[in-house]
Image (spheres, helix red, strand yellow):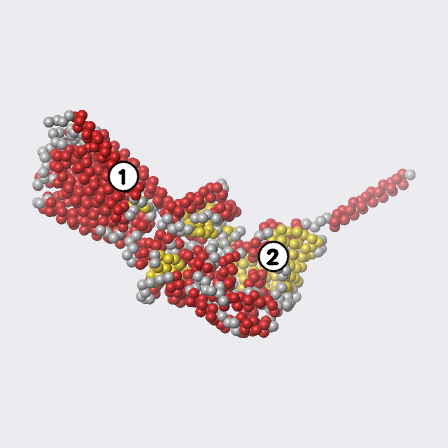
């Protein structure tokens, strides 16, 4: 008799423990993903060096425009986009200063982002999301999140004058990795910047 | 013999009352009918040459006279920005404000449409080649390149309608050359705590009342809408300074005249002891002021506030005449008889003083002329009052007010010979030392800087400089003014100068320029460009061919073709066609009508080389193109004024000396009469210089007054036909005169208006030296005469 009640207790305890741990696991999966989660994950990577493939879809074009290049990021305030083909362009933002240069204007031009609020917003979308900077993003955008930790989509809707031009900027990624940026304009035009790891050739082109 | 005292008093009283009432009525009439102006530039206006007229116009109605700079200083950027937004919202619709900007205010939609519509006519950056196949191909290549860049969303905005990018080129002319940094779309300075704003008023400083209303409105708006603890308002700019200056001058004039009246009455009471003398003693002065105002009003149409203030105090010398009369009254002699006795000397004094000031009335500077006329009319009226009216108002038997000590004084004067020689020697030494010693810095003899006459405080000037620095908007100093018979004529002449200006810019002689023609070309130019436009149908065909090599959709550029067709049919634009806004304001500032001429202005930007600019425009040898340097033009105007004043003063002095020499027959006597004046004037000038004060125009005028006063004292003292014991009365009269005048000018010296301070200090010093010199010389005169 004693043996049977002891066994029963063990089984019950074991069962409850299992149920508790199982439900805990389930909670983890069932718990809703927040913007903070994603940004937190993103902020864990202070340096990024990737390549991108950008494709712009415009109503006035019969086919999308494609370009490739490198995207460098250094937390919290440096982002550099270097387009390699077909039209070289250098576009780098350090804090509030933007430096641009292209083949047509070989001398680098320096602009103060604060003087161009829409541009400031656009740069913040890219830089802020890569840095996981909720405060910076919050100044320009309303954020909302969809999906799971393994496949999330952060939607940024502009609050200021930028909304006269853009509808939203969607950042899609997985865990702490960003897979793509999609910029949607008010008229329906959109551009997709896919982030891909650089092949050796692409890396050496970037130097 | 003695008439019924009651009857006499009765008739005198009735006449008295009548005459006083008449005088009161006349005063009221004169001051109601004569407008009083307080604008400094009216004071200086001369209007001889075109350049001077332009200068006056620019100072009164030009852009610089209408800009108010506002600064909101807060503890941090957010507060400053919020205050700036609040103030902007409060003032944006004010009727007295033509425009207010606090950030990168974009051009309105109407303005953008206007520029878009007229872009081919306004832009010089396209040719017929731009529409050829090669031209179109190059344009499309450029557009595609821009679409590939990160700035694509912006480039796309006008791509379909303007692939040749003419709109952006025209638009860039309307963007201000330098703009401050932005924080949240609002201007902020380098420290991040001062948010500057710029407001342009509709009225120029020619209409100070309107400007004052707007300045008050700005202050009210700040108090109501934008005043948060910790936020300070700074207001600078010509309208602010001009209205403040006027208010200050008004206040000063009011309180100084009150103070002067009290002081004069106080001294007269202390000296003469009968309230009759006190009241009547002020009468010649009052009559003089009214007469002076009436004369200036009749001749010039209005009186300037400074003329009134200065004139009224210069007529403080008119207190001297009744004092002389009262001091010399003797029992047994009627007042009228006393006056007849004094008349020769009084006449001489009046004539010499009038001559001294009268010289100024002949000047072509309206300010000096007004002063001259005021002084002459006032002095004549004062003497007439003293001689003709006062005796009738004095009661029958006035007791003599001369105190006993005064009667005994002349004896004392003969003694103390050594002391008197020492005093004179000191004076002469002072005068001799002045040209030799430089008190340091160095101190030039003359100061022609208009800033020294300004009532603007150093604090305000600093705030102004700070705001201009924050806005990147230096004050406009160098202008080229082109005059034409009508709007288009002026515009075409201005256009013709563009190549020269561009060359100057390329060569570094000027940093840049802004001309009407850059915003709106003349009709002739617009029509010439219109004729160059190709046929839309032809371009459509060519474009269809070129587009096939690009990823553009075929129908993308339909708006471009439609616009081209419309442009060929446009009526060229005039200034009146521009929609209201920043651009229209700029056009109105740079192109305006003055009298029967139209002026097109070209503003030159610093840093520039004034010599090369002047040479370039002088080389044109055209009298319808004038290069103005506002700052040096005002400085040289002041210098001319001063030279003129000195010249006329010298002339006046010589005529005065001639009159003296003719009247006082032994030449030695005339010399003695003039010597105290000469010593006093030279001594005052020397003392000021040694004290580190550079003399200005107003010091010159004050020295003139000193000369007049000195002459008055000296002539009375040295008059040959002295009644025994009369020197006591004379001495007493002179002392009272000196004290009353000194009291009034001491009050002036305490003023915050620089001009009035200069007058006050100079005359006070002059009187002291005059007194000393007259008394020191008196002893010698008696012994030699």
Q: Is residue B15 visible?
A: yes
Residue at 29% over, 39% down: B28
User: In the shown orientation, is residue B371 left or right of residue B535?
Assistant: left
Q: CA distance from mark 1 to mark 2?
A: 74 Å
Q: Chain of mark 1?
A: B
Residue density around tag 1, few if under 14, some if 14–19, many if 20 or more, within 10 Å: some
Could you tell me if the residues under marks 1 and 2 are in contact, i.e. CB atoms within 8 Å? no
Residue at 11% over, 47% down: B662
User: In the shown orientation, is residue B3 left or right of residue B243?
Assistant: left
Q: Which residue is mark 2?
A: A166
Please identify, in this view, whether the residue under mark 1 or under mark 2 is nearer the observer.
Answer: 1
User: In the shown orientation, is residue B649 left or right of residue B110?
Assistant: left
Judged from the image, the secondary structure of the residue bearing numbered disc 2 is strand
Residue at 35% over, 52% down: B60
**Position of the N terminus of chain B by quadrant:** top left
Residue density around tag 2, few if under 14, some if 14–19, many if 20 or more, within 10 Å: many
Judged from the image, the secondary structure of the residue bearing numbered disc 1 is helix
Q: In the rendering, at what x and y percent does residue B133 appear?
A: 54, 74
Camera-side residue of A131 and B606: B606
Q: Is residue B329 above or below residue B81?
A: above
Q: Chain of mark 2?
A: A
Labels 1 and 2 share a subunit = no
Camera-side residue of A32 and B40: B40
Residue B246, quarter of picture = top left
Q: In the rendering, at what x and y percent does residue B93 appear?
A: 48, 48
Q: Which residue is mark 1?
A: B27
Residue B730, quarter of picture = top left
User: In the shown orientation, is residue B204 left or right of residue A63?
Assistant: left
Residue B258, quarter of picture = top left
């Amino acid at each position: 008799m004693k043996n049977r009640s002891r066994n029963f207790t063990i089984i019950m305890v074991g069962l409850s423990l299992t149920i508790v741990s199982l439900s805990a696991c389930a909670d983890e999966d069932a718990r809703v993903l927040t913007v903070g989660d994603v940004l937190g994950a993103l902020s864990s990577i202070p340096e990024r060096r990737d390549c991108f493939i950008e494709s712009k879809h415009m109503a006035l074009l019969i086919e999308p425009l494609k370009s490739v290049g490198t995207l460098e990021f250094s937390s919290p305030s440096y982002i550099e986009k270097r387009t390699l083909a077909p039209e070289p362009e250098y576009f780098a933002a350090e804090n509030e200063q933007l430096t641009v240069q292209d083949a047509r204007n070989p001398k680098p031009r320096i602009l103060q982002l604060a003087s161009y609020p829409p541009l400031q917003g656009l740069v913040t979308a890219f830089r802020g999301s890569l840095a996981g900077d909720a405060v910076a993003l919050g100044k320009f955008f309303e954020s909302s999140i969809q999906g799971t930790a393994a496949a999330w989509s952060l939607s940024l809707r502009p609050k200021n004058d930028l909304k006269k031009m853009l509808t939203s900027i969607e950042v899609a990624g997985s865990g702490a990795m960003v897979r793509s940026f999609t910029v949607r304009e008010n008229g329906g035009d959109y551009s997709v910047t896919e982030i891909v790891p650089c092949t050796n050739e692409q890396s050496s082109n970037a130097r | 013999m003695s008439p019924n005292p009651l009857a006499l008093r009765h008739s005198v009283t009735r006449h008295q009352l009548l005459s006083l009432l008449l005088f009161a009525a006349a005063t009221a009439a004169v001051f109601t009918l004569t407008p009083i102006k307080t604008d400094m530039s009216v004071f200086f206006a001369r209007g001889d040459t075109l350049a001077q007229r332009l200068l006056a116009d620019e100072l009164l109605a030009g852009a610089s006279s209408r800009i108010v700079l506002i600064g909101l200083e807060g503890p941090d950027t957010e507060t400053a920005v919020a205050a700036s937004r609040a103030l902007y919202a409060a003032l944006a619709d004010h009727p007295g404000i033509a425009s207010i900007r606090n950030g990168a205010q974009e051009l309105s939609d109407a303005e953008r449409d206007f520029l878009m519509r007229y872009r081919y006519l306004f832009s010089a950056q396209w040719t017929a080649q731009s529409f050829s196949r090669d031209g179109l191909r190059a344009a499309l290549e450029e557009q595609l390149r821009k679409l590939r860049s990160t700035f694509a969303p912006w480039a796309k905005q006008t791509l379909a309608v303007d692939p040749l990018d003419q709109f952006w080129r025209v638009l860039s002319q309307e963007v201000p050359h330098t703009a401050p940094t932005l924080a949240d779309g609002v201007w902020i300075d380098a420290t991040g705590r001062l948010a500057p704003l710029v407001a342009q008023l509709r009225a120029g400083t020619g209409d100070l009342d309107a400007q004052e209303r707007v300045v008050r409105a700005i202050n009210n708006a700040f108090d109501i809408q934008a005043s948060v603890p910790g936020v300070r308002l700074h207001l600078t700019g010509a309208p602010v300074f001009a209205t403040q200056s006027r208010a200050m001058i008004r206040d000063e004039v009011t309180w100084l005249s009150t103070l002067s009246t009290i002081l004069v009455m106080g001294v007269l009471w202390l000296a003469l002891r009968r309230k009759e003398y006190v009241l009547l003693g002020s009468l010649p002065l009052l009559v003089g002021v009214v007469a002076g105002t009436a004369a200036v009003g009749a001749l010039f149409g209005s009186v300037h506030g400074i003329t009134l203030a200065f004139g009224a105090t210069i007529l403080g010398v008119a207190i001297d005449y009744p004092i002389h009369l009262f001091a010399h009254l003797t029992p047994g002699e009627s007042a009228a008889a006393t006056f007849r006795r004094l008349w020769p000397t009084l006449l001489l004094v009046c004539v010499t003083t009038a001559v001294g000031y009268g010289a100024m009335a002949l000047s072509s500077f309206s300010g000096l002329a007004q002063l001259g006329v005021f002084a002459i009319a006032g002095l004549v009226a004062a003497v007439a009052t003293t001689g003709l009216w006062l005796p009738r108002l004095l009661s029958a038997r006035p007791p003599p007010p001369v105190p006993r000590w005064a009667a005994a004084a002349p004896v004392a004067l003969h003694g103390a010979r050594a002391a008197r020689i020492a005093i004179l020697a000191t004076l002469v030494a002072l005068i001799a030392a002045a040209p030799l010693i430089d008190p340091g810095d160095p101190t030039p003899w003359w100061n022609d800087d208009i800033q020294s006459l300004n009532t603007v405080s150093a604090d305000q000037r600093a705030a102004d400089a700070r705001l201009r620095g924050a806005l990147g908007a230096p004050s406009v100093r160098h202008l080229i003014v082109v005059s034409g018979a009508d709007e288009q004529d002026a515009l075409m002449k201005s256009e013709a100068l563009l190549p020269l200006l561009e060359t100057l810019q390329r060569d570094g002689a000027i940093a840049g320029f802004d001309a009407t023609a850059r915003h709106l070309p003349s009709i002739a130019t617009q029509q010439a460009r219109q004729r160059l436009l190709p046929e839309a149908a032809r371009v459509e065909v060519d474009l269809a061919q070129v587009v096939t090599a690009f990823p553009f959709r075929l129908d993308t550029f339909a708006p471009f073709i439609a616009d081209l067709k419309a442009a060929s049919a446009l009526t060229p634009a005039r200034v009146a066609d521009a929609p209201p806004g920043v651009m229209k304001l700029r056009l109105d500032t740079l192109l305006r009508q003055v009298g029967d001429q139209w002026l097109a202005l070209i503003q030159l930007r610093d840093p520039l080389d004034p010599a090369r600019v002047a040479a370039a425009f002088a080389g044109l040898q055209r009298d319808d193109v004038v290069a103005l340097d506002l700052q040096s033009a005002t400085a040289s105007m002041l210098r001319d004024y001063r030279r003129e004043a000195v010249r006329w003063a010298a002339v006046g002095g010589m005529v005065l000396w001639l009159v003296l020499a003719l009247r006082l027959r032994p030449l030695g006597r005339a010399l003695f009469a003039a010597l105290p004046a000469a010593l006093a004037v030279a001594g005052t000038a020397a003392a000021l210089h040694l004290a580190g004060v550079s003399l200005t125009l107003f010091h010159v005028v004050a020295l003139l007054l000193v000369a007049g006063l000195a002459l008055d004292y000296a002539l009375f003292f040295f008059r040959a036909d002295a009644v025994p014991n009369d020197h006591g009365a004379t001495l007493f009269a002179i002392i009272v005169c000196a004290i009353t005048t000194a009291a009034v000018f001491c009050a002036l010296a305490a003023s915050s208006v620089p001009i009035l301070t200069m007058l006050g200090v100079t005359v006070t010093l002059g009187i002291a030296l005059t007194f000393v010199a007259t008394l020191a010389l008196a002893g010698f005169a008696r012994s030699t005469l």
